[in-house]
Image: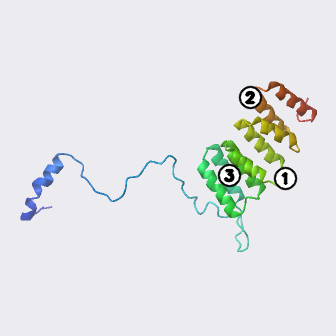
Amino acid sequence: MNIVFRPESLFLFPTLFSSLTHHQPPKCLSSVAPKTPHLEPPLNPLPPTFFSPGKNQKKSRNAKPDYELPIISVLRDCSSNFLIPRGRQIHGLVIKLGLDSNIFVQNSLISFYSQCELIYSAKKIFDDFGKLDAVSCNIMIAGYVKSGYLNDTRELFDKMPGRNCVTFTTMIMGLANNGFWSEAIEVFGDMRFSGGVSE
């Protein structure tokens, strides 16, 4: 391969050669502003196929897609990994889809906010229930205990219908971990009297 220089390009060659020998990176101008660092990673939109019907679900024009299981799964992941912005995004999607009256989705939202120690958000969803549900009460009691709201825990425990072994155990652990030993023993006695523990 032969390289031929035209006469006018010979004047540029020394300049080009000297810039290559100094090993300086070329300077480029850009009209794009430099990115500022984010405090939190940006939220990626959920993939469009995430909430699409599964293989075993029939696709029909009149059938509404079932989003319950994917939403519960994502909320569980958000609570275990402390992904508060993503969980709030899913909460907004729940409201948009009209699933905020679904008891399983509501319990998942309460669990998400409780495990992330956003107890006021959890209490707001819990208070919107029409009636007290044993599972919802257990989730809320666990959230109160984790956040250290023992008075609220005891108040809900006393008025909760259908207390079970999970309820008693959560209450006893909350009292014992905060130094209320006599109250914990009293609740344990109530649990034995109610048949919550075997002899």
Residue located at (64% from left, 61% from top): 51
Could you tell whether 65 is left or right of 138 in the image?
left
Q: Which label sits on residue 177?
A: 2
Q: Position of residue 174 (x, y in %)?
A: 76, 33
Could you tell whether 30 is left or right of 124 in the image?
left
Question: Where, quadrant-wise, is the C terminus in this rendering?
Answer: top right
Q: Distance between the residues labelled 3 and 2?
A: 30 Å
Q: How far apart are marks 2 and 1 (CA)?
A: 30 Å
**Element at badge 3?**
helix
Q: Which label sits on residue 34?
A: none
Q: How many marks?
A: 3
Could you tell whether 157 is left or right of 30 in the image?
right
Q: Which label sits on residue 131?
A: 1
| Amino acid on which disc 1 is placed | Lys
**Relative height, residue 186 to residue 162 (above, below):** above
| Amino acid on which disc 2 is placed | Asn
What scheme was used to colour the molecule?
rainbow
**Element at badge 1?**
loop
Question: Disc 2 or 1, which lies upstream in sequence?
Answer: 1
Mark 1 Cα within 10 Å, few/some/many (few <14, many 20+)? Answer: few
Q: Which label sits on residue 73?
A: 3
Q: Where is residue 69 in the image (x, y as percent from the top left)?
A: 71, 56
**Relative height, residue 101 to residue 168 (above, below):** below
The answer to whether marks 3 and 2 mark residues whose Cβ atoms lie closer than 8 Å is no
